[in-house]
Image: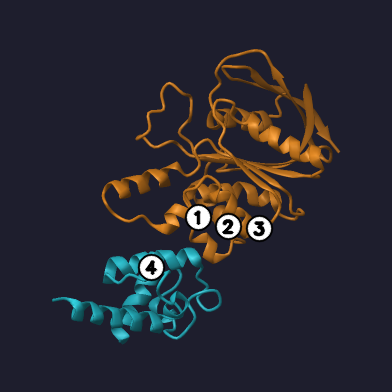
Amino acid sequence: MNGLENELKQLIIDSLDLEDIGVADIDSQEALFNEGLGLDSIDALELGLAIRKKYNVRIDAEKDDVVKIFASVATLASYIESESARGQNERP
Amino acid sequence: MQQDFVIQQWALWPPLQPDEGRDLARQQALLAGVPKMLQRRLSPLARTVFCAANPCIEGQAAMPAVFSSSHGELAKSLLMLQTLAAGEEISPTAFSLSVHNAIAGLCSMAWQNKLQCTVLAPCEEGMAAAFIEALGLLQEGASQVLLVFYDEPLGNFYPAAPFHLSNGETRALALVIGKSGQGQALALSILPLTGNDGEQAIQLSAFIQFLADTQSQLTLKTPRHSWHFENHGTTS
């Protein structure tokens, strides 16, 4: 889990141009949006795209509870992990 | 018809005499007030706009703004089209920053300015359209208007000939104008004389020289008519 969380932190830094921030500066439990890291709605879309490209996991604003999934690095990591596992089980 | 107004303040970026080391430090100082989370979204053209406009709004009450750029962030749009053509998904951030009012939006966020903001893309008339818009705002009762002209060279992908679009420079000029006040008094009028002095980016160089050298007049010819600026001297 820790590995995926650190990977996600790096993905957040790279895809959102957070030049002055390092992996160690992001707390896995910290809020990503508004307070906390201070990301905005455009960042959410950009991060969603980066996650789709890297993990082949689609976060659907219509169906999924986006607010909960994007709450922190920890919630994002657990969602990606459960979706990846589900994807593998569904494959014939 | 003649319109009188006063240029109370103006600033351009980059400076007319570039100096790499000094300019970089100056640019950092000019951008220091822009929140970090917004700074990461600034393209080179957006940085140029901020560096010209920030000195003009410093210490001033919030004022409505008119932005004018022939092509805005067209390079971003081209890059997205190429990404789509390659069958890849485009970046939502790049899309949001590619629209013609993107830089004006970043300015309004950085300055917390909720007043009216207009963004024009003039063609062969060049700079005049933004002046007319700003003069209209003054006529409506605004005491000051911020005018920002900016452009970067058009990418090679676009066939620019036979139009006079660019002189190969990235440049921004910001002006604060009012009906009166302290500054340089100008009169703008339209003349029947026709010609072709180029579009905004090319006109901008001539206009900056006009301001910097306090020339007595400047005529910008277009295929339909000319825009004539007359310098009426300094007001106090």
- SS at badge 4: helix
Q: Are marks 4 and 2 in contact (CB under 8 Å)?
A: no
Residue A71, position as x, y percentages in the image: 46, 80
Q: Nearer the viewer, mark 2 or mark 1?
A: 1
Q: CA distance from mark 4 to mark 2?
A: 29 Å
User: Could you tell me the amino acid type at mark 2?
Assistant: Leu
Q: Are marks 1 and 4 in contact (CB under 8 Å)?
A: no
Q: Residue at x 20, y 78 (%)?
A: A90
* B126 is higher (above) or lower (below) than B61: above
User: Could you tell me the amino acid type at mark 4?
Assistant: Gly
Q: Are the residues under badges 1 and 3 in a single subunit?
A: yes
Q: Are marks 1 and 3 in contact (CB under 8 Å)?
A: no
Residue B27, position as x, y percentages in the image: 55, 53
Q: Residue at x 38, y 33 (%)?
A: B158
Q: Is residue B199 left or right of residue A66?
A: right
Q: Outermost residue, right direction?
A: B236
- SS at badge 3: helix
Q: Are marks 2 and 1 in contact (CB under 8 Å)?
A: yes
Q: CA distance from mark 1 to mark 3?
A: 14 Å
Q: Are the residues under badges 3 and 2 in a single subunit?
A: yes
Say which residue label 4 marks. A48
Residue B178, visible in the rendered structure:
no
Q: Are the residues under badges 3 and 4 in a single subunit?
A: no
User: Could you tell me the amino acid type at mark 1?
Assistant: Leu
- SS at badge 1: loop
Q: Is residue B12 left or right of residue B179?
A: left
Say which residue label 1 marks. B42
